[in-house]
Image (spheres, rainbow, N blue to C red):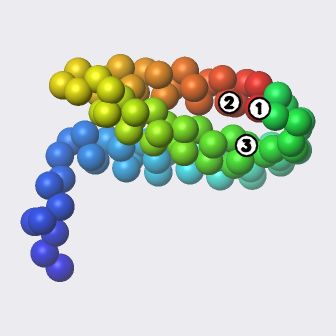
Amino acid sequence: MDLAWMAWTWETAAFFVSIATALGIMTALALLRPETERIGALGLPTTRGDRLFLSLLGAAFIHLGWLALAGEAPVWGASILSLLYATTVFRWT
């Protein structure tokens, strides 16, 4: 299979490795410490998987907004904002 059209860079590889690592950590946590739903700021019962999904979805929107509003600014700023958002989601949601 020819994947030359995909423009693989180290940043792309780091993204996919970090997603795979997060899924691996979530799987290990589910095996070692079974999940219990908790009620957070949204008033909805959520699990770790739900909070990971919300974090990834929010990170996608933060990065899209960064690209639209910040123009040529480095994307590291959006990544830092995404990590802060994920921390907030896991803490209070």
Which type of secondary structure does the marked residue at label 1 adopt? loop
Question: What residue would you read off at disc 2?
Answer: 89
Where, quadrant-wise, is the N terminus in this rendering?
bottom left
Residue drawn where x is 47% and y is 51% of the image = 20
**Mark-to-mark CA distance, 3 and 1:** 10 Å
The answer to whether marks 1 and 2 mark residues whose Cβ atoms lie closer than 8 Å is yes
Q: Where is 22 relative to 74, above or below?
A: below
Residue drawn where x is 47% and y is 39% of the image = 61
- The number of numbered discs placed on residues in the rendered structure image is 3
Which type of secondary structure does the marked residue at label 2 adopt? helix
**Mark-to-mark CA distance, 1 and 2:** 5 Å
| Residue type pointed to by label 3 | Arg
Count neighbours of disc 3 (C-alpha within 10 A) and say few if under 14, some if 14 to 19, many if 20 or more: some
Of the pair 38 and 54, the residue shown nearer to us: 54
Whether residue 23 is visible here, answered yes or no, is: yes
Q: Position of residue 10 (x, y in %)?
A: 21, 42
Question: Is 36 on the left-hand or right-hand side of 81?
Answer: right
Question: What residue would you read off at disc 1?
Answer: 93
Q: Earlier in the sequence, mark 3 or mark 1?
A: 3
Q: Position of residue 46 (x, y in %)?
A: 81, 44
Question: Is 5 on the left-hand or right-hand side of 74?
Answer: left
Give the image quarter of residue 64. top left
Of the pair 30 and 45, the residue shown nearer to us: 45
Count neighbours of disc 2 (C-alpha within 10 A) and say few if under 14, some if 14 to 19, many if 20 or more: some
**Mark-to-mark CA distance, 3 and 2:** 10 Å
Of the pair 93 and 65, the residue shown nearer to us: 65
Residue drawn where x is 40% and y is 27% of the image = 79
